[in-house]
Amino acid sequence: MDEQTAGPAGPEDVIIAVEDPGLEQEAATIVAATGRRAIRVDSPDPSDAGWRRCAAILIDAGQATAMLARVTAGDGARPARQGLFLVHSDDTGPPERVADELGCGEPVPLPSCGAELVGRIGRPGAVRAGRVIACAPAV
């Protein structure tokens, strides 16, 4: 699935919240490479169900800064979650401060780290590593 649509995001979808058109195209290409559906969002909202349940979120510094302003004003939930990636162009410096505020780890430069990001997002239906909660002996 390489479509890019608007609307509610499901558990296998990836939200793209990117202002820069060139960077948005790179993000859409990465999502297409995973086989997931890209959901374009103009105003990301961490309190939205799609934010919490989607497979991943690709966001740039412009969208992240605006979203963080809404969150700190008390109009939203905490944005930090697994699968949140702050993307930036190879031509610009990494927005470290914004990444710290988002709680998403290191910013991801595109297109140079696109292949790595495809692997980090994963394919639909792929089982991800998780926490072991119990071990039962074989009988």
Image (cartoon, rainbow, N blue to C red):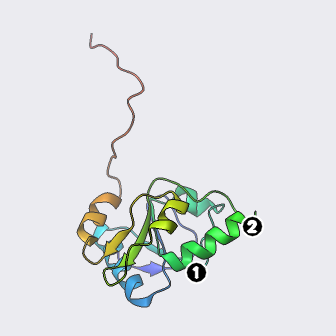
Residue 108 location (% of width, % of height): 35, 68
Q: Which residue is mark 2?
A: 73
Give 112 or 130, whichever is nearer the viewer: 112
Q: Quadrant of residue 118?
A: bottom left
Tell which of 123 and 58 is nearer to you. Answer: 58
User: Residue 95: where, in percent of width, then height?
Assistant: 44, 72
> Real-space Cα distance between discs 1 and 2?
19 Å
The amino acid marked with disc number 2 is Ala
Viewer-closest of 124 and 46: 46
The label on residue 57 is none
Query: Mark 1: which secondary structure?
Result: loop
Q: Quadrant of the C terminus?
A: top left
| Amino acid type indicated by mark 1 | Asp
| x, y percent for residue 26 | 34, 81
Image quadrant where residue 32 sits: bottom left
Q: Is residue 98 visible?
A: yes
Tell me what residue is drawn at x 46 percent, y 58 percent: 104
Label 1 CA crowd tier, 10 Å (few <14, some 14–19, many 20+): few
Picture quarter with the N terminus: bottom left
Q: Nearer the viewer, mark 1 or mark 2?
A: 2
Q: Which residue is mark 1?
A: 42
* Residue 52 image point, x, y percent: 56, 56
